[in-house]
Amino acid sequence: MSDRSVLITGAGNGLGAEIARAAAAAGWIVGVLDRDLEAAARTAASIGAEAIALGADTTDEAQVGAAFDEFAARTGHPAPDGLVANAGIVRFGPLLDLDVDDWRRVVDVNLTGTFITARSFARRVVDAGRSGAIVTLTSMNGVAAGPNAGAYGATKAGVALLTTQLALEWGPLGIRANAVAPGLIDAGMSGPIYADAEIRRLRSERVPIGRLGTGADVASVVLFLLSDEAAYVSGTELLVDGGVTGSVISTLPRPRSVDSVGPGGRADDGADR
Ligand SMILES: NC(=O)c1ccc[n+]([C@@H]2O[C@H](COP(=O)([O-])OP(=O)(O)OC[C@H]3O[C@@H](n4cnc5c(N)ncnc54)[C@H](O)[C@@H]3O)[C@@H](O)[C@H]2O)c1
């Protein structure tokens, strides 16, 4: 059995499940935590003996603590080596009409739940005299505003800053913390968007590398940040978006003279494009 373990929240479905399967394939013992225990059990069963299903709501500190304790008892590790704080939700609606309860629940799960889980992890790592790595899941939506995204983008920007603060406060304790910000991903909560073939095509065309992302694209970056290969990486947010977040200027109307600047930086007046 592997001597490295990682607990992944929201791993009953979507990206968390994909990350759990990739982590197990890379040799990690995996704690598959979800508020939906049946979903967690399904993910764990798809992995096998290296996975342990855990039921907890990440907004409830007592439930999260009990899940960490159960994982410790079943792995024999007083603290896991890694945490992927992946559990997140979105509730859409225009801000003018958004129900405040929807706003609060998204803040609670995405921001407060990430804090609760990260602190439960860090306390155990410190008590065990070990080191550890945290990866949080943010979003391109925390970098660029999206219409009708409610509290989602604000919470993801908050998680990005929280992750930097974790790196700052806990780096001296031996804990690295980094965020992964997925872009247009054809999986999990975005899956229904891409059931529409025309939306798929149009969005794929907007990504500089020409395709939507997959759960595997996200999982491999999460695993890199958990690993010793990233031993000197902390406090950063890594966009996994094929370049789309940074491409906004290309969507703006431009005068032809800008498009006809030649390789030397001079306007190529003779060009007919
Ligand atoms: N899929 C995407 O396109 C995309 C893009 C950018 C960021 N993200 C982020 O990636 C993460 C995973 O998203 P996904 O697409 O896999 O979502 P998903 O809805 O497919 O899965 C989320 C899982 O988290 C669980 N969960 C939700 N709230 C929880 C809580 N309070 N406690 C425990 N478990 C809880 C759900 O039961 C579910 O199994 C989220 O943080 C999301 O914001 C996703």
Image: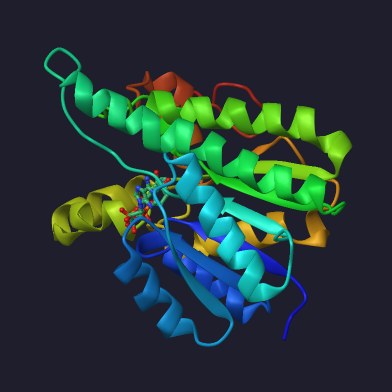
Judge by depth and name the residue closer to the eye, 233 or 217: 233
Q: Where's the N terminus, which quadrant?
A: bottom right
Q: Residue at x 56, y 73 (%)?
A: 22
Residue 109 at least partly seen: yes
Its colouring scheme is rainbow
Q: Is residue 84 above or below residue 119?
A: below
Asked if residue 241 shows in the view, the reply is: no
Which residue shows up at 82% across the image and 60% down it? 228
Q: Is residue 235 above or below residue 199?
A: above
Q: Which residue sits furthest top?
A: 96
Closer-to-camera residue (75/151): 75
Residue 51 x %, y % = 54, 77
Q: Nearer the viewer, residue 232 or 193?
A: 232
Q: Is residue 230 left or right of residue 122?
A: right
Residue 122, percent from left and from top: 71, 43
Q: Quadrant of residue 109?
A: top left
Residue 245 in the figure: left or right of residue 77: left
Image quarter of residue 211? bottom left
Give the answer, above or below, for where 200 lies relative to 13. Answer: above
Q: Residue 188, relative to residue 117: is it above or below? A: below
In the image, taking residue 230 as reference, residue 141 lies left or right, namely left
Q: How many marks?
A: 0
Q: Residue at x 55, y 49 (%)?
A: 65
Residue 18, percent from left and from top: 46, 68
**Lateral position of residue 2 relative to residue 96, left or right:** right
Please state the horizontal and vertical placement of residue 31, each as a whole percent of the image. Answer: 55, 67
Image quadrant holding the C terminus, namely top left
